[in-house]
Image (tube, coloured by chain):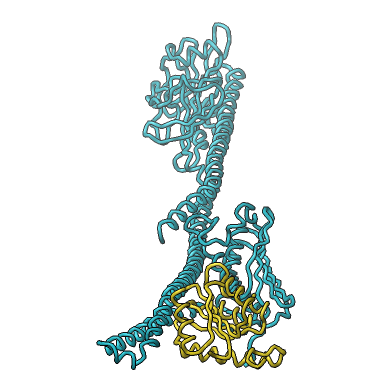
Amino acid sequence: MTRPYANLSRRMTIVALLVALLPLNGLGLGLYYYYNYANTQAVKEELRIRALNRASAIELFLAERTALLEVLAHGARLTQLSNESELANLLSIMNRRSWSFVDLGIIDKDGRHRAYVGPYLLKEQKYLDAPWFQQAMQKGVYTSDVFLGYRQVPHFVIAVKHDNGSDSWVLRATIDSDVFNRLVRTAQVGKSGDAYILDRQGRLQTPSRLGGKVLDPAPVDMHSVAPGSSVVERTTADGRQVLTAFSWICGGKWLLVIDQDPKEILGPLNLARNVELAVLGLASLFIIMAVFILVRLFIRQLQTNDAERAAIDAQLAHSARLVSLGRMAAGVAHEINNPLAAMSELAGEVQDILVPSELAKLEEGEVVGENLERIQNQVERARGVTHRMLKFARRMEPHLEGIDINDVLRESYSFIEKEALFNNVKVQLDLSPDLPLIKSDRAQLQQVFLNLMDNALDAVGQGGRVRVMSRADGSWLTVKVSDSGPGVPADLAGRIFDPFFTTKDPGQGTGLGLSISHSITQRLGGSLELENHPGLGATFVVRLPNTPPDTP
Amino acid sequence: MSSFKVLVVDDERDFLESLVRRLQRRSVDAAGVTSGEAALEHLEREKADVVVLDVKMPGMNGIEALRQIKQCHPEVEVILLTGHASVESGVEGLALEAFDYLIKPVKLDELIERIMEAFDRRKVVGELTGSPPPDQS
């Protein structure tokens, strides 16, 4: 592809791609980010609701056990519960319905463990300084944080005070950590999810699957956790991006924490988003392919048209050169023939005077006679040359034969049909069906018609109309080529048949087309005229003599 | 002198004078003028049977002169003689009823032959139209 075509091709490709791809991809990326945002919001909300539900379940679990212990503590007498076999009986009854108590104990007001049933040897231990004992004595009911205690095993207890004035005592039960931990762990989701409880100091109250053992500090900034329930995105100690739901439980005593890997839960939701992205990519690919193919087709068509155009121009220019060459030859021959004729006559006259008998009287008469003869021979020789030149010129002259003008018009139209189609120009052929055959020059007429149609196409540009009409009218045949173009400006109308006069851009026309067409029609005994309607179009009228062809 | 009159019209004086003298030397009653206008004037004054006419001349050209000669003196035969051979002038000349169309340089014998033929036709046409050549009057 030559340079201008390559440039045009590149510009068209870039513009088409920008126009097609920018809005599409803008919309696509907007949707992509919207999906992302909406999905994340949905997941966060779901996580928060789950945290709230689990928090309620845990609170309910503790409240039920506290209530049971309160009933026991308030309904029984100290002597009754101090009997360890009674107490053991009670514990086994309670655990039969999976109430999940590890042990039961009675502590008197001095902090002495009066009675104990359970797996540890804790009877007679002193609890006067234990925080849970002090809190229970003070508040009546108390659920402790997890601590090690005498048994050196992490656990937490519920303590209820039997208030009997100076003879008060405390019923204490240890919650089965396995059962409680399992309850908390039901909030976990997926392979990488985690759920655990922290106390106000940020120590683990239940084990974290990934974060550590009970009583270890957890990497959560307790001060930044909002009251109630909330969801945040955060980075864990091992560098994972997680969504974390916080929910305070038991009146702000503990914090339920649920960690979740967003990828795991967003995965299915993001499928739609990824499909959208894939469709966007495919559509872009198709558009790019289509643009490249279309641009290539267009450029190829343009090249073909330009080449055809160039061929027509070259043909016209070639004919123009031949015609002018012929004229020059004829002119030269004429200029030489006249002096030749004079020389021939002058020498001939001398020959007439110096007949052989006169020559004999001269001293060198023989030489004079011979030279006169040679002059005539030289004239004859030059005459041969000029007559050959005239013959050549005459070959450029019309070659007359019987022709059907409509046929010539149709043939000329076939040359420009493609160009007309390409420029969306409607060409109407209005040919009289009963046109007589006339004696004229087919090739030269074709040149005239082709030239006029070509000019008309140039004049109307895109989407115009051209009308070609033929009529017989007595002794003349008329062909009209009309266009719906701007017409010829009035001040230029007189010059359009001048050689080298053109209104086209430099390089677009030789300025010889109309001039040649004009002289061809004249030589054929006809005429070429312009019927000009500035602003409405131009009509070129070719008139040809209605000479019947020689009958063979 | 011949029994008929010839008028040669050519702007080339060397050619014209020499040709006229050579024709006279061969007993042809010939005269010469150098333009179409002069030819018409000459014909007004003096009759001619055959006019040998150059096509390309300054002022009135040969074709125009031919047209006017045929208009005013339809009985006169005209032979066109030119250095330029173009079919358009040839066709036009013949259309205007010129007797023949010759290209310079032409041999004198050949020219005289054509003049004789033209005069023969002049005689035939003259008999038909009732305008006889001078020698028969």
The N terminus of chain A, quarter of image: bottom left
Q: Residue at x 60, y 78 (%)?
A: B92
Position of residue B31 measured from the top left corner of the image (x, y, whole percent)? 53, 80
Which is nearer the eye, A20 or A356?
A: A356
From this view, report whether residue B119 is shown above or below residue A109: below
Q: Position of residue A532 (x, y in %)?
A: 67, 58
Q: Is residue B73 left or right of residue A252?
A: right
Q: Report the quarter where the C terminus of chain A lies.
A: bottom right
Q: Nearer the viewer, residue A162 or A401?
A: A401
Residue at 36% across, 88% down: A354
**Figure check: A541 above or below A73:** below
The image position of residue A300, as x and y in percent, is 48, 64
Quadrant housing residue A3: bottom left
Q: Which chain is cyan?
A: A
**Visual hue assigned to chain B:** yellow
> Does residue A11 sit above or below A449 in this rendering?
above
Q: Is residue A473 above or below residue A161?
A: below
Q: Residue at x 53, y 68 (%)?
A: B58
Between residues A35 and A128, which one lies in front from this camera angle? A35
Residue A433's quadrant in the figure?
bottom right
